[in-house]
Amino acid sequence: MKTLICCCLCLLTGLFSAHACSILYYIDAKTGKIYAVNNEDYWFDVSPYILIQPHTDGKLARLWYGWGKNAQGGINEAGLFFDGAVTPQVARVKGYHNPVGNLGDDILAQCHTVEEALALLEEKKVALTDGHLLFGDRQGHATVVEWVNGKRNLVNIQNNVLMATNFLLTDKEKGNYPCPRYAAMEAAVQQLQASSSPVGLKEVGNIAARAVQPMATGGPYRKAYGTLYTSFINITDMEFVLVYKLDNAKQTKLDLKAEFAKPTARTISLQ
């Protein structure tokens, strides 16, 4: 595992939202290695943490990050990754409902692949009205699932890349489009794919670094917000790095194979 992952933070200006997020799933065509990166943009007055749960009878070992009692994103020992982003509000799909309990933990505990995760959502009759989810697995399958105009829509990976920010990929007219953060990441992907340089977690992470948000203040109480943390995952080699509040001095680096082999759960507070 690399001793240090340095992120070249190319900060965008002119787009400040406490709920803006960006997710990237990337397959290096040269090596076949798979990477996932997420910028979690939110209010700074929460207490985020990483939770690692061991393998138990009927449940996979898993790592997720978030605050409160809910997983905002994570990965399990089978190599299934997920994260989500807020989107414009849409009407509820008939017969479906919002998640009950900690849906992210349920998915990571039970599912090995993207297909299994989608099946679990259907089994639980979950349909978000203000967000979409990106799932990617170790086999190279990746999908963004959205619920628009009364039905479930899937956007599958193409040309080794799948990205999501805060507009609906299957109905851009609903709002938040065009998205300069998505466009910045798209341009960075094209540069990386055209380059002959070796690709690793740092290089893929720097794609998502094009979409980070520096700290700002907003809302009726003038609260601080921005990129709360960025997670970097080498799914193939099971490497994990999280950078807190865009500060490379505040890194959490984990060997996921070693972590998932441990018999007890542990919590890592981010500060």
Image: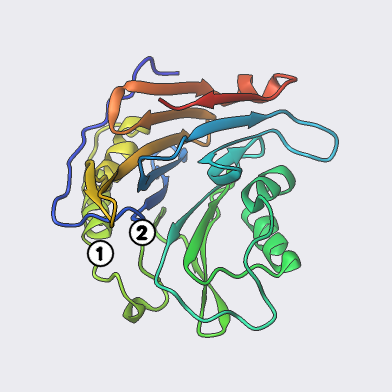
Q: Which secondary structure, mark 2?
A: loop
Is 14 situated above or below 72?
Answer: below
Q: Which residue is mark 2?
A: 165
Residue 270 place in picture, x, y as percent: 45, 27
Q: CA distance from mark 2 to mark 1?
A: 8 Å
Residue at the top extreme of this rendering: 3
Q: Residue at x 52, y 72 (%)?
A: 129
Q: Which residue is mark 1?
A: 179
Quadrant of the image containing the N terminus: top left
Q: Residues at badges 2 and 1 in contact (C-beta under 8 Å)?
A: yes
Q: Residue at x 51, y 59 (%)?
A: 133
Question: How many numbered markers are drawn?
Answer: 2
Q: Which secondary structure, mark 1?
A: loop
Q: Earlier in the sequence, mark 2 or mark 1?
A: 2
Observer-nearest residue: 188 or 129? 129
Q: Indicate left or right for 169 with 91 as reference.
A: left
Residue 151 place in picture, x, y as percent: 58, 81
Is 120 situated above or below 244?
Answer: below
Q: Quadrant of residue 7?
A: top left
Is 106 situated above or below 165?
Answer: above
